[in-house]
Image: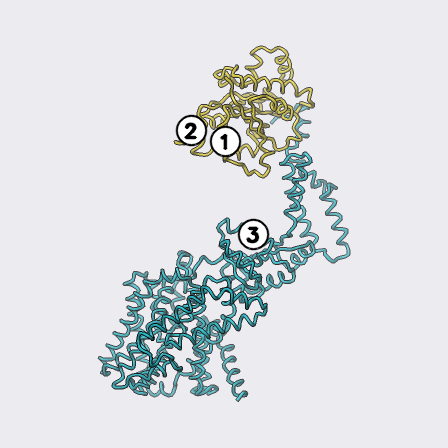
Chain colours: A cyan, B yellow
């Protein structure tokens, strides 16, 4: 048993590890890589994974739930409100028109009315997993076309609930008993009256919102206080699983519930930590989901009905694209957005598997037709990555547009230009300074009380450890320009800096150092922007001391600036020699330089004094030779 | 009537000055004259514009006292003009705050008087070279007065040699403060010094002539 489990895990992981990088390298995107790998390991090609793939898929669908939770985390209620028109307008138009057209075509092809309606509903759905993963991977989710796609998917998530309710009505004579098959779990609400059910649904939604708003902070703080990262991870998973469970119990889509929870927690200071924790699970489960979709492709069945299935797949995809294009144009999207929107949503989604299973159980569709529809669904999913690849070849449209309209990001706020790791004595001054200058800054700190305090003053701070790659990523390292590290532990600064350089080579890194020796270490490790924490203040005090001793203020100021410049340059020179035999000799020389002993004929003091000096001019004036 | 005078003093290295440091001693204790040391007040060039504008409003005559670096003032004086003489305050449709006041320069030059002449190596007269200040005053609705000039400051070696200039400057400020100087004449003259000397003060004339020869 456990040997079998290990073997299965080995096959799935190996397939992913081999296929996905190859697919990405070929520009196909990870989704197609997973799907193809799934097909290869599936029962009809290599036969490495078998009939259990239905269970695997059911488990892997949890990846979709996690993905919606993560997307919810990046959305704030205000943005969701702004998207209400595309969600309701475009969403309902897409579902109704596509279902109508597909059902109509089925009728024309000679299907009876009920199966036609069922097929229309099934094929109206698109794949949240494929669309969001593909768009996110290419950075297209922020484009207007991507946003429209996201809105429609959200509507579909809601629409699937009445659809599940509608299926039994389509079944001749057989009413009820269907929801069980659809959810794979018992709904607590069976046997309750309609208004009681409604009340329970509202109560569940309310519990998520109220809990997220008021309970989450003390709970998060309590758990983060244990300072055990894996406990926080466990809690993050527990949260998503718990919400899914709650939603299933009242008959709502777990994905929708998770999304709602994500939106509620979007403003929490623990948001990035949650993102960092859930992200790898989401990635793995989604991959597993795509693999099992690939494995479910029934090749013998397809070979048997090759012409019909290919024709049906192409027909459905073309039809969906036409309807989507039309909707996008009616809602006044530009052609480029319309194409992105239409091609992205052109496949049949994973809800189809659920709906088809239900429809078959209820006798709405025959087993044969259901198998055909499942094959069409799986094949249509495989068409999306190549279609999007074609779109990407379209002359630089996507990239140009992205620059053109920075306002249209799906992320709730301007992505931080700066990530500030550490909000202690140094970090808080830098953070407030940047804030005062309107620079969007994302603050990470591991002190929960500090973070809460910071948020009270209106800065965007999150609880999280910047030395974790997933935290940096969640804080937006891919889009930020600058990483400022002001924590006090030099070894940790180096670790963060090294990691950032490796994974986000575009990031400019600024690092704090407590002591001269730390500065040497960081400079020698290749960090160009190193700041000794006491230098500025000490030199300011020195300059004020000069002034209080009677020096002109401007002279003191210039002397301070010159000393500082010399000191910085000397430190960089000396860093190379740190640890060598002649270091102290060189250090002495530098100090002498600064103390007015000659270097190359001009000491530091000489250089300051040369300004506005007119000795030579006086000589000329005295000699009377000052002429042109 | 008495005029309130604001001396805007700009010298980046007063510790090296040979003339200006004596000239400012002459200024500091005259009643009605406010001495304002810009480089000491704003070593970081962070000029407090509101405070400077209030100072301008509280005075009738604005004197810019500075070494004549490259035919102009030191950098901070230019910064001061750029920031303080704002549109809407000093000039423009609504900018009437300085109307009716007067502006002048008090400068020290390294070169001799004859160099500031169409035939001299500086090719222009002092008034011509100061025309940017003159025009600034004009645009602000201020009257521009002839400059007080100490030439050949480079060859002045000690307090004794600087003293006659300091005395003349003190006299000029007193006359401007008391209103005993004819402003029309002051606006028309080449140098304010000439008016004071011509007014008949023998010892001063002697000293001045000696220094300027």
Count residues near mark 1 (Cα–Cα under 10 Å), then give few for <14, some for 14-19, many for 20+.
Answer: few
Tag 3 subunit: A
- Are dots 3 and 1 on a single chain? no
Q: Is residue A227 above or below residue B94?
A: below
Tag 1 subunit: B
- CA separation in Å, label 2 and label 1: 14 Å
Q: Residue B34 location in percent, x, y? A: 56, 26
Q: Residue A497 location in percent, x, y? A: 60, 61
- Of tags 3 and 1, the one toward the viewer is 1
Asked if labels 2 and 3 touch by Cβ distance under 8 angstroms, the answer is no
Q: On the rendered image, what quadrant is the C terminus of chain A found in?
A: top right
Q: Residue furthest bottom?
A: A1
Residue picked out by circle 3: A430
- CA separation in Å, label 3 and label 2: 41 Å
Residue picked out by circle 2: B96
Q: Is residue A574 above or below residue B175?
A: below
- CA separation in Å, label 3 and label 1: 34 Å
Residue at image x 71%, y 41%? A603
Q: Residue A559 location in percent, x, y? A: 66, 40
Q: Reading the chain from its start, which is encountered first: label 2 or label 1?
A: 1
Secondary structure under tag 3 reads helix
Q: Does residue B124 appear in this view?
A: no
Q: Is residue B63 above or below residue A580?
A: above
Lateral position of residue A582 relative to residue A87, left or right? right
Residue picked out by circle 1: B54
Secondary structure under tag 2 reads loop
Secondary structure under tag 1 reads helix
Q: Nearer the viewer, residue A508 or A77?
A: A77
């Amino acid at each position: 048993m456990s040997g079998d489990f290990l073997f299965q895990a080995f096959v799935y992981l190996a397939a992913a590890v081999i296929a996905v990088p190859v697919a990405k390298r070929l520009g196909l995107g990870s989704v197609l890589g997973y799907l193809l790998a799934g097909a290869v390991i599936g029962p009809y090609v290599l036969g490495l994974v078998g009939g259990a793939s239905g269970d695997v898929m059911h488990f892997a669908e949890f990846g979709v739930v996690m993905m919606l939770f993560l997307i919810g985390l990046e959305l704030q209620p205000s943005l969701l409100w702004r998207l209400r028109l595309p969600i309701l307008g475009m969403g309902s138009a897409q579902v109704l028109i596509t279902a109508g057209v597909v059902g109509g075509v089925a009728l024309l092809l000679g299907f009876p009315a009920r199966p036609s309606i069922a097929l229309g509903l099934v094929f109206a759905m698109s794949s949240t997993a494929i669309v969001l993963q593909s768009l996110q991977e290419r950075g297209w989710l922020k484009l207007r076309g991507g946003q429209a796609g996201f809105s429609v998917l959200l509507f579909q998530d809601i629409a699937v609930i009445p659809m599940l309710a509608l299926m039994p009505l389509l079944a001749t004579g057989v009413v009820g008993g269907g929801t069980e098959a659809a959810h794979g779990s018992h709904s607590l609400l069976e046997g309750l009256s309609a208004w009681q059910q409604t009340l329970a649904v509202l109560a569940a939604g309310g519990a998520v919102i109220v809990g997220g708003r008021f309970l989450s902070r003390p709970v998060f703080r309590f758990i983060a206080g244990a300072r055990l990262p894996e406990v926080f991870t466990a809690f993050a998973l527990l949260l998503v699983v718990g919400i899914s469970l709650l939603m299933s119990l009242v008959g709502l889509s777990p994905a929708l519930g998770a999304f709602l929870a994500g939106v509620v927690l979007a403003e929490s200071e623990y948001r990035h930590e949650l993102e960092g924790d859930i992200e790898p699970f989401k990635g793995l489960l989604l991959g597993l989901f795509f693999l099992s979709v690939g494995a479910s492709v029934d090749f013998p069945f397809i070979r048997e009905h090759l012409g019909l299935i290919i024709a049906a797949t192409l027909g459905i995809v073309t039809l969906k694209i036409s309807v989507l294009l039309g909707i996008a144009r009616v809602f006044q999207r530009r052609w480029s957005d319309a194409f992105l929107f239409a091609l992205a949503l052109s496949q049949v989604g994973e809800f189809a598997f659920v709906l088809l299973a239900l429809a078959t159980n209820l006798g709405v569709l025959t087993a044969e037709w259901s198998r055909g529809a499942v094959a069409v669904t799986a094949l249509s999913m495989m068409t999306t990555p190549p279609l999007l690849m074609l779109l990407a070849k379209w002359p630089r449209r996507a990239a140009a547009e992205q620059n053109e309209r920075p306002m249209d990001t799906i992320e709730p706020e301007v992505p931080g230009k700066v990530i500030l790791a550490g909000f202690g004595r140094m970090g808080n001054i830098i953070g407030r300074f940047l804030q005062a200058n309107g620079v969007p800054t994302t603050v990470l700190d591991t002190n929960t009380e500090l973070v809460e305090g910071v948020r009270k003053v209106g800065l965007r701070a999150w609880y999280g450890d910047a030395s974790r790659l997933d935290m940096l990523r969640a804080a937006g390292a891919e889009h930020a320009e600058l990483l400022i590290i002001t924590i006090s532990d030099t070894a940790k600064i180096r670790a963060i800096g090294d990691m950032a350089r490796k994974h986000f080579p575009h990031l400019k890194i600024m690092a704090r150092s407590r002591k001269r020796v730390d500065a040497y270490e960081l400079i020698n490790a290749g960090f160009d922007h190193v700041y000794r924490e006491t230098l500025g203040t000490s030199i300011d005090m020195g300059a004020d001391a000069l002034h209080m001793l009677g020096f002109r203020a401007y002279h003191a100021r210039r002397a301070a600036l010159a000393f500082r410049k010399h000191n910085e340059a000397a430190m960089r020179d000396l860093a190379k020699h740190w640890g060598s035999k002649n270091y102290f000799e060189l250090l002495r020389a530098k100090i002498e330089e600064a103390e007015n002993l000659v270097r190359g004929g001009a000491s530091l003091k000489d250089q300051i004094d040369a300004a506005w000096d007119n000795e030579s001019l006086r000589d000329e004036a005295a000699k009377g030779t000052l002429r042109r | 009537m008495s005029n309130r005078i604001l001396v805007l003093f700009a010298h980046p290295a007063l510790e090296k000055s040979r003339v200006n440091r004596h000239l400012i001693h002459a200024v500091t204790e005259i009643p009605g004259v406010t001495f304002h040391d810009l480089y000491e007040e704003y070593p970081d060039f962070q000029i407090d514009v509101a405070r400077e504008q209030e100072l301008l409003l509280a005075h009738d005559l604005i004197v810019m006292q500075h070494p004549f670096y490259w035919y102009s003032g030191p950098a901070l004086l230019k910064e001061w003009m750029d920031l303080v003489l704002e549109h809407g305050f000093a000039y423009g449709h609504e900018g009437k705050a300085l109307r009716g006041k007067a502006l002048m320069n008090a400068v020290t030059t390294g070169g001799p008087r004859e160099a500031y002449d169409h035939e001299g190596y500086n090719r222009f007269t002092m008034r011509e070279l100061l025309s940017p200040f003159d025009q600034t005053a004009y645009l602000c609705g201020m009257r521009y007065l002839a400059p007080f000039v100490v030439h050949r400051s480079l060859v002045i070696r000690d307090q004794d040699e600087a003293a006659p200039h300091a005395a003349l400057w003190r006299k000029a400020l007193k006359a401007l403060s008391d209103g005993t100087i004819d402003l029309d004449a002051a606006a028309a003259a080449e140098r304010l010094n000439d008016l004071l000397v011509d007014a008949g003060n023998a010892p001063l004339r002697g000293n001045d002539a000696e220094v300027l020869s």
